[in-house]
Structures are given as C-alpha cells and as structure tokens.
Amino acid sequence: MDHDEIEIDVPSFFVCPISLEIMKDPVTVSTGITYDRESIEKWLISKKNKTCPVTKQELSDYTDLTPNHTLRRLIQAWCTLNASQGVERIPTPKPPTNKIQITKLIKEASHSSLTIQINCLKRLRSIASGSETNKRIMEDAGVVEFLASVVINNSCNIDPASLMSEINVNPVDEALSILHHLHVSETGLKNLLAFRNGEFIESLTKVMQKGFFESRAYAVFLLKSMSQVAEAVQLLHQKTELFVELVQVLKDQISSKVSKAALQTLIELCPWGRNRIKGVEAGTVPVLIELLLENCKDRKPNEMMLVLLENLCQCAEGRAELLKHAAGLAVVSKKILRVFL
C-alpha cells in the first residue's frame, strides 16, 4: 500500500524507512529500528548489506528480526478505522519457516513415492515464495543439496512423459524451478559445482538436451550463476557435451534472457584449459556468425557474441572456423564498427 495515494494523514511510525510505504509485517532489528520485513530482508539478503539502514550500525544476523506485533496491530486497527476512505486492512502475516519443518519435508520427500515427493516439492516452493528469510533458512537446512539430488536421480531418463507423476508434474522441472527462485548464495553455488563429483553439471547438460523449454532455461541460468563464482580449477574439465547443449540453446533462441545467460556461461568457461577448443568443436563459431548476421538491434548480446568469438579465435581451430564461414570476417568487422564506434 502506497501511503502517498491515501488522502488522509498516515502516522509516520507506520511507514517503513526503506520503502516509505505502510508496513505490512513490521519487524525490529537489533538496533531497535523497525522496518517492513520484505524491505529489510531485501536490504540484508538480496542487496548483501550488513548494516542498519537508519543507524548504519552493523547487524549480526539476517534471521534476527523480531516481529513487532504491537505496531502491526496498531496499523491494522488504523486501517479498519479508515476503511470507509478506501484503506484496505493488512492481513496478519505468516511467521517464517524453521529448520525443523524444512528438514522434516526433505526426509519425507527422500523416502516416499514420486507423487508424495512432488507434493513435498510443491510445499517447498510455496515456503520459498514466502520471504527471503525462508529462502535462506531452506538453504541452511540442506534444501539445495536435496534438490540437486532430485535432478541427478531423475535426469538419466528424462522422458517428459515417463517422469510425470499422477498429478502431471515432473520432479526435475519442479526441483529446477525451486533452485532458480531460491537465489542460491555464492557458497551454495560453489557447493553445487562440486556436488557428487560434478554429477550436477552433467545432469544439467542432460536437462538442456531433453527437457522442456522452461527447465532448459532454468538449467542455463544455474550454469551461468555457478560459472561466475567458480574457481578456475572447477571449470577446467567440463565435457564437450556441455558446450554442445549451450550452443544448441543459442540456436533455439528460447528467449533473449536465456541466450544472454548461455553466452555468459560460454564466456566464463572458454578461457580455461581445453575449453576453448571444446567450444569450437561444439560448433560455436558458425552459430555466432549466423546470429550476428540476423542483425539483432540489442547491443548487449552483440557485444557478448564478439567477446566470445574473440576468445575462441585465440586458438588455431577457432580462427580456422571463422575463415571457413563465407561471412565470417565481413560480419565481425561490421559489428565491431557498430558496437565500439
């Protein structure tokens, strides 16, 4: 609710210092300042700040948010009193989840039928959508590793029809959707890279090969996030199949956002070890040239494609592929002039 749109005076202590809107779920931090839960969670978690926005004092723990029930009841009562002027009553918020609840769900899903597992996954997705705090509690409880296991255990035989449960949901699709919306932390992403000796990366490759468009997109987004935080040694020994499927994603043009994520992943991968040659062997060079020929008006993907081409052409195989294509040198020269002048 935006208090600027209400033609009555709103008590200043009802307003969140961050969002400048009436608080729906007021919580007090260790410095004694009260904020709306959603706003302070975004400040602390999504924006990775560690201080109180008002006092600038350091805050020790993002989970140390105390519900201000008294203020919330005052706001609700004020909304009720002003209902005739179009003010909607703020509902009582749900409390954050806890580690015990999440651990129980993981255990139940790990030792149950496919249908029960799907139901547990749906509940996890609902909990994750509740708040940023829920997402971090879920990660701390081991949800990321559990979801990675679901993807690995079901990716070997990804047949969209055979993997459907009685309620027509694929566990791989559901697990990848949750992982994407969890906004996994940098530590969690690094753990995924090494999870079960790299099996998760192989599973994402299979998802890109056989999965639905949405799951393929989630797989690419995860690969991009992981590659951006990975140590060089973790990127050295990726299989050619990974490059083949990333290039196929570029050819399929699922969406502009997915294509940019695939390009960024290839840019992160190619400088290390023999990855540059694997990228060339996967057919990246002619695909990039053809995409550049399509004359995309968006400058960013053109820049990314040129960066990737320049990287691939640092090996003899890449230069040979560029020269082999009839339009190779011409399109690159033309794009360089347009992008950088």
Image: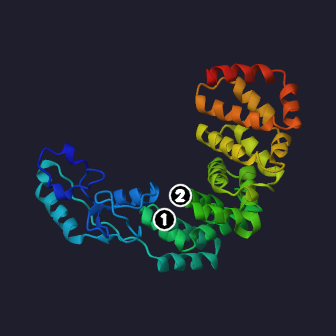
The residue pinned by badge 1 equals: 135
Amino acid carrying mark 1 in the image: Lys
Depicted 263 relative to depicted 124: above or below: above
Secondary structure under the numbered disc 1 in the rendered image: helix
As rendered, which of 186 and 242 lies closer to the eye?
186
Q: In the structure shown, which secondary structural element does the residue marked by tag 2 occupy?
A: loop
Left or right of 303? Residue 246 is: right
Q: In this view, does 12 lie to the left or right of 1?
A: left
Q: Which of marks 1 and 2 is nearer the N terminus?
A: 1
Residue 168 in sight here: no
Q: Which disc number belongs to residue 231?
A: none
The percent coordinates of residue 333 (x first, y second) are 73, 20
Label 1, label 2: how far apart the Cα atoms are: 8 Å
Pinpoint residue 248: horizontal percent, then vertical percent. Answer: 75, 42
Q: Residues within 10 Å of mark 1 (few under 14, many from 20)?
A: many
Are dots 1 and 2 in contact, CB under 8 Å?
yes
Identify the amino acid type marked 2.
Answer: His
Which image quadrant for residue 285? top right
Residue 56 position, x and y percent, is 33, 59
Q: In which quarter of the image is residue 249?
A: top right
Q: In this view, does 214 lie above or below 340?
A: below
**Which of the 4 quarters of the picture holds residue 271?**
top right
Q: How is the image coloured?
A: rainbow
Residue at the (76%, 28%) spot, across then down: 289
What residue lies at 30% left-to-right and 53% top-to-bottom?
A: 18
Task: From the image, tell me which residue sits under label 2.
Answer: 183
Q: Residues within 10 Å of mark 2 (few under 14, many from 20)?
A: some
Nearest the eye: 267 or 73 = 267
Quadrant of the rendering where the C terminus is positioned: top right
